[in-house]
Image (cartoon, helix red, strand yellow):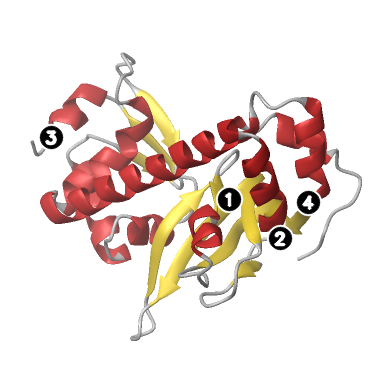
Amino acid sequence: MQEKQGINIEALLARVPLFSGLVAAEIARIARGTREINAVRGDVLFHKGDSSSGFHLVVYGQIKLAFTSSQGGEKVVDILGQGQSFGEAVMFMEKPHMVYAQALNDSLLLHISKSVILEELEKDPRLGRKMIASLSLRLHHLITDVESYSLHSGRQRIIGYLLRENMESDEPAITITLPTNKGVIASRLNLTQEHFSRILHELSEKGLIVVAGRKIKIPDVEKLRCYDL
């Protein structure tokens, strides 16, 4: 894992929703406390138990947040992509990281130091409101996940995942590309890889999906949406 030179940090920060509305001088101050990290697939950004000195923003690529159980199994907590951030809550709590972060593919990230964020929060309450909103949205997603694990079958979780970006779409048929391998997605949905594959096979046999590697065609979105209700 390397720091990458020659990137315009201020320009990247200006495109991040969290910092939208900040003036150039404010962006410049945050940029002085920001460094770029070039992570190749498999690189670990931090381990569970490491202290936090700031938080990360994904410029491009994909990052997995996970922890390992006492039995050695991995539980994926989240999969993050372009424009998403992670590590804010731990930074504010002054607690060690509760998960580890690993690059699922080659990624460029920005690490924004805790000190520069605290300084800006004192100067501009708008940034504080945006960070609270971001953390609240993360909490909402976590509660939704817990509800799904508790109340929905494995089949319902997978169907919801396949349709998550198209819940309001009127397209009768769609093709999606899984962002990472089936084992990682299965863990994210609190399923074993075998259970995940078995349900995909079942949906395929019923003609509800057509699987070709990571590409999954859904010939009738409404039919899949209504299946197993």
Residue topped by disc 2: 40
Residue topped by disc 1: 62
Residue topped by disc 3: 227
Q: Residues within 10 Å of mark 3 (few under 14, many from 20)?
A: few
Q: Residue at x 60, y 40 (%)?
A: 82
| Picture disc at residue 33 | 4
Of label 1 and label 3, which has the lower sequence position? Answer: 1
* Residue farthest along the right direction in this orientation: 6
**Amino acid at the residue labelled 2:** Val
Q: Which residue is drawn at 30% across and 55% down?
A: 189
Q: Which of marks 2 and 4 is in front?
A: 4
Q: Position of residue 171 (x, y in %)?
A: 34, 15
Q: In this view, does 171 lie above or below 55?
A: above
Q: Is residue 202 visible?
A: no
Q: How crowded is mark 4: few (under 14 residues within 10 Å), some or many (20 or more)?
A: some
Of label 4 and label 1, which has the lower sequence position? Answer: 4
Which quadrant is home to the N terminus?
bottom right
**Amino acid at the residue labelled 4:** Gly
Q: Position of residue 105 (x, y in %)?
A: 63, 55
